[in-house]
Amino acid sequence: MTTNQTQNRIKIFDTTLRDGEQSPGVSLSVQEKVIIAKQLEKLGVDIIEAGFPVSSQGSFDAVQQIAREVKIPIICGLARCSKKDIDAAWDALKEATHPRIHVFVATSSIHLEHKLKKSQEEILAMVREHVTYARSLCKDIEFSPEDASRSDMDFMCKVIKTAIACGATTINVPDTVGYAQPEEFGERFRYIHNHIPTIAGITLSAHCHNDLGLAVANSLAAVRNGATQIEGTINGIGERAGNTALEEVVMAIRTRSDFYGVHTSINTNELFKTSKLVEKITGLSVQRSKAIVGKNAFAHESGIHQHGILSYKKTYEIMAPEDIGWEGDTFVIGKLSGKHAIDATLKEAGITLTPTQLESVVQKVKTLADKQKTVAKEDVVAIAVDALGMASVKEDAVILEDLSVLTGKNITPTSTVGLLINGEKKVGVATGLGPVDAASKAIRSVIGPFINLKEYNLRAITGGTDALASVAITFEDHKNRSFSSEAVDEDVIMASVKAMIKGVNKAMAAHAQQGDHH
């Protein structure tokens, strides 16, 4: 890596295991934290803030175990300006290949007056004492003036100067309560660079919360104004509205490298896998429309968009799904989908249709989508196979015109079918053990006993209560010849009856060709 590349690299500081665990309802075991830490190592983060060791025995154990097992990233532990905190952090971290102690104290007047009840002079004294002490134990010290975005700019700078003079190697500027706006947060970083000469050679970091939905925007504003480290969490988890979503910052920097002029060392192919692991272990679901890793992040349902993507991906995709290891469906088939997407889906499955057949399938897909919003690829394939089967029968001798089924608790299933047989309307009524059995017997009462249902197989194409039903049946005629057919429908009984009618037509067509009478 050249000197220029090194200078333009943004370090990624992951605090999923510390700040992220502060999400309400999340409590990770030591082993779960180690699993996530090892995946973060694969992802290529520069620093893992593994926990707040003094806060509990479990937190201490997790930091210690991660320090022992995860070798490539810097392993960081959080500590207040307290020797007890710093000692606990160092005891947990001292076996790490690359340890870091992260010391913090609040600097805003709100915190000084209402939480700490200390003067600015007392805060400066605390910083001098405790940063110096931490540096005596560990050569890599990060210091944060908590609630920096609401702190007086000049006092914040005094605190930062003091921390640097006492040995801090990284200065982190936190927007602790998500109060900052991008322009003013960027100005705070410019102010630091212009008023603290000793900041040269120091890593300057941004740590943003998402209370106003601006954590990523503020972090990127910091990058534009001299930040060389960004702190955040996977999926943006964290207390209240969460933290900067690291996957969003990383992909913004990568996708708009022309604008930011910087890069990270993140292996973006591991982003989706990391997101899913954190989602599974924490139990915090990622919203469908979440940028980068949400289920809909690379999904296109609109026919216009799908046509554009098929023609040239960059018409509607600014990132390649494979760049983040994304595993979802690019095309979501729904009522807004067009023939291009449906045709592409079928060709991927090895099915090529004529324009007429394709139009028929498109209309059936849209009808289904009106009922169940989205249609799985398997559903599209099943509809096409069904259409091809129907097209193979040139002229149906039997057409289903009406169907009704009555069933329920303490009610004998009864079915009435209205069939057009060679243009003549006939009605059949029957009872059965169940609604499908009743419908089968009603059909047989009309067409006669020359065929018998020998096999019946039902399966759901996709999961869920709105799944398409696929029914495969085999009829046997009085000469022991078999006729198989299959049909799909969102209604089990309709799928069954459609399969039976197709089987009947196959049998009648075969009998007509051979001059059989029944």
Image: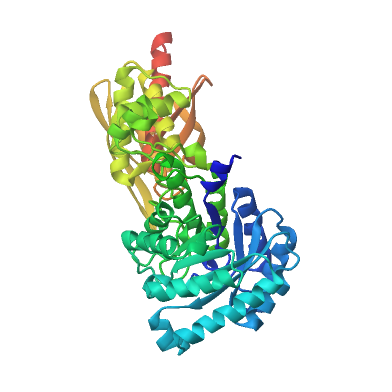
Image point (58%, 79%), residue name: 128
Residue occupying the point 44% across, 22% down: 351
User: Image height check: is 134 above or below 365?
Assistant: below
- State the image coordinates of residue 307 (x, y, percent, origin top left): 32, 28
Specify the quadrant that holds the C terminus: top left
| Quarter of the image where one finds residue 470 | top left
Q: Residue furthest front?
A: 197
Is residue 122 visible in the rendered structure shown here? yes
* Vertical order, 303 against 290 (above or below): above
Q: For residue 73, which quarter of the picture?
A: bottom right
Residue that protrudes farthest toward the bottom in the picture: 117
Residue 314 spot, x, y in % from top left: 37, 31
Q: Residue at x 50, y 83 (%)?
A: 123
- Along the viewing direction, whichever of 343 and 10 lies nearer the viewer: 10
Q: Is residue 396 visible?
A: no
Between residues 60 and 131, which one lies in front from this camera angle? Answer: 131
> In the drawing, does residue 50 fall left or right of residue 177?
right
At which x and y percent is residue 132?
A: 63, 76
Where does residue 9 sit, x and y in percent of width and height?
53, 47
> Is the residue 513 above or below the residue 178 in the image?
above
Q: Is 161 on the left-hand or right-hand side of 195?
A: right
> Which of 489 and 48 lies nearest the eye of the viewer?
48
